[in-house]
Image (cartoon, rainbow, N blue to C red):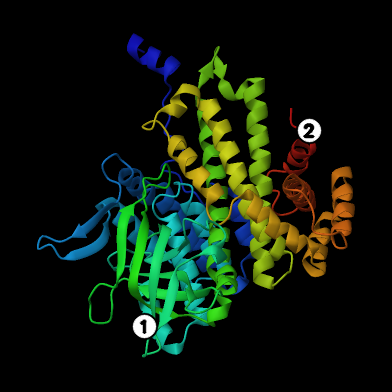
Amino acid sequence: MSPETALKTAVAPEYSGASGSNFFTEDRLVSAILTERLPGPRRAAALAALTAFGAACGGELGRLIEEAHQDGKYPRLQKYDRWGRRVDRVVYNEEQLQARRLAFRHGLLPPKPLLERMTMAYLLAQNGEGGVGCPLAMTDGLAAVIEEYGTAEQKALYLPIVRDADGPTPFTGGQFVTEQQGGSDVSAGETRAVLAVDGTWRLTGLKWFCSNPGELWVTTAKPEGSNAVGLFLVPRRLNDGSLNECHILRLKDLSGTRGKATAEVEYRGAYAELIGRASRGIAILLNTVISASRLHVAAGALGFMRRSFVEASLYARARRVAGRPAAELPPIAAALERMEAELAAGTLAYFEGIACIERGDPAAEVLLPLLKMELSRGASRMIHEARLILAGNATLRDFSILPRLAEDAIAQEIWEGTHLVLAGHALKALRRPASGAAIYAILSKHECQDGRRLARRLEKLRSAPASERPEDVLEICAATWRALRVALLSREASGPLDVDGSFTRLAAVLAAPVR
C-alpha cells in the first residue's frame, strides 16, 4: 500500500452511503410488513413492483434527483415567450422531468392500493423531497377530490390530465390555499368567487404559497355574498388552449424542497369550477387533499429517518477512530441504537396508521395528525444526530445527502399544519368516544407505567372542558406518541415483524429516560 493510499484509508475511508442499494429489499422490517399484510392474490406482483421501485430509488431515480439539485438547475419562471406573449409556466431541468416521469411510470397514484403506493412514497422520500414528493402528494390529493366529489364531466375532463405521465409537468396537481393574512386559517381567506351565467365561477384574489403550479389545481375562495369557503378546480389553460387568468407573480426562494416550485399566484377573474357544495369547501379539503398530504408528509418524514439512519450507520462502520470502527465507540453506539429504536417504532406506527385507514378504524382520526406531527419532528432530530456522526463531512453537500435532507425536513414540519395545529386536531380526535377508545385499545395492551398513566389521562379527556393550554396540548400528544411507539414494539416483539429479535430491546431504549 502506498503512503497516499494509506493516508486516504485512515483519514477519508471509501464511503458511498446507501446509493446503489435496493431501498426496499434492504429494509427488512418494511419488507416483512408488506409480506405479512398484502392480500394473497396480489402479494407476489406487489412485492415484485416494490422491489423494482426500490432498485430505482437507490439507482437511476436517486441519480436523477441528485443531478436535478445541483446549483443552477432549480426551477425558474418563464413569464413571456419570444414574441412577448404571456406564458406563465415553470421551467424544470431535464433531470427533474425525467425523475418525475420515471417515478410516475412505477404507478404511485390510484388505483394502486393505499398500502403499496404509500410504501412507494416512503421509498421515494429516501432521496429527500427531490422535487417529486410534494408534487406526488398534491396530485394524489387532487385525484382523490375529483374521484369523490367531482361531476361526471369533471372526471372525464380532468382525471386524464392528472394521470398523464407525458404532460408538460408530470404529477401536475397543485394546491393553492394559503393567503398572507390567514396562514393555516383557511377561513380567513379573502379570495372571492363570482358565479358566471354558464354556471362556472370567476376568482379574484392572491394566493401566497402555491405548491407545484402545474396544469390543474384545487383552490379555495368565498362565493360572493357568503363567508363560507368553497373549493374549486382551476386549470392552467382553458378549453380553447388560451391561458387562464392565473398570473404567477414570482417563485418563492425556499430554503428547502427546492426541486419543485412554489409560487405566488394572483387570480384576475380566473375561470374555475366548483367542486362539491359551496358551503363545504373546508370539510372537503380536509377530508381529501389535506388528509392525503398529511399522510404523504408522514411517509416523507419516515423516509428521511430511514435514509439518515442508514447513512450514519454505514459511515460509522467505515470510519475508523483510534484503530477501530467509530460505530464501536460507546457514545456513537448509543446514538445509533436510539436512532434504530425510533426508526423501528416510527415504521410500525406509520404502517399501523395505514392499516387503520384501510379498514376504517376510528384510531386513524388520531393517528393521521399524530404521525404527520411526530414523524416530521423525529426526522429533523434524526438527521441532526446523523450529521453529528458524520461530523465535518456532514456539512459538505458533495459528500452525502444529509445537508439536503436537513433543509427539506423543516419544510415537512411546516407543511399541512404546524405542530400546534396538528396537536389540536389529534386532541380533538382523542376526545371523541370512538377514536379515543380505539387508541386506548392499542395502548392498554402495553403494561408500562407511562402507558397506564396516559390511558387514565385519555379517559379524563372525554369529559374535561377543552381548555388546555398550548403546552398541555403538545405534551398530551407527545405522551401519546411515546406510549404508542413502545406499545407497538412490545406488541410485535417475537412476531413475524421482529425480523432480528430486537423489538424488546428497542422498546426498552425508548422507555428509558433520554439523557
Percent coordinates x, y for residue 110 in the rendering: 49, 72
Which residue reaches farthest front? 225
Q: Classify 350 as above or below 397.
A: below
Amino acid type of the residue that numbered disc 2 sits on in the rendered structure: Pro
Q: Give me the residue at 57% from left, 60% from top.
A: 185
Left or right of 331, for residue 395: left
Left or right of 79, for residue 115: right
Which residue reaches farthest left? 83
* Foreground pick, 220 / 325: 220
Secondary element under disc 2, as helix, strand or loop, is loop
Percent coordinates x, y for residue 373 in the rendering: 63, 51
* Foreground pick, 504 / 456: 456
Secondary element under disc 1, as helix, strand or loop, is helix
Marking on residue 157: 1
Left or right of 475, for residue 185: left
Q: Name the residue under label 2.
A: 513
Percent coordinates x, y for residue 261 in the rendering: 36, 54
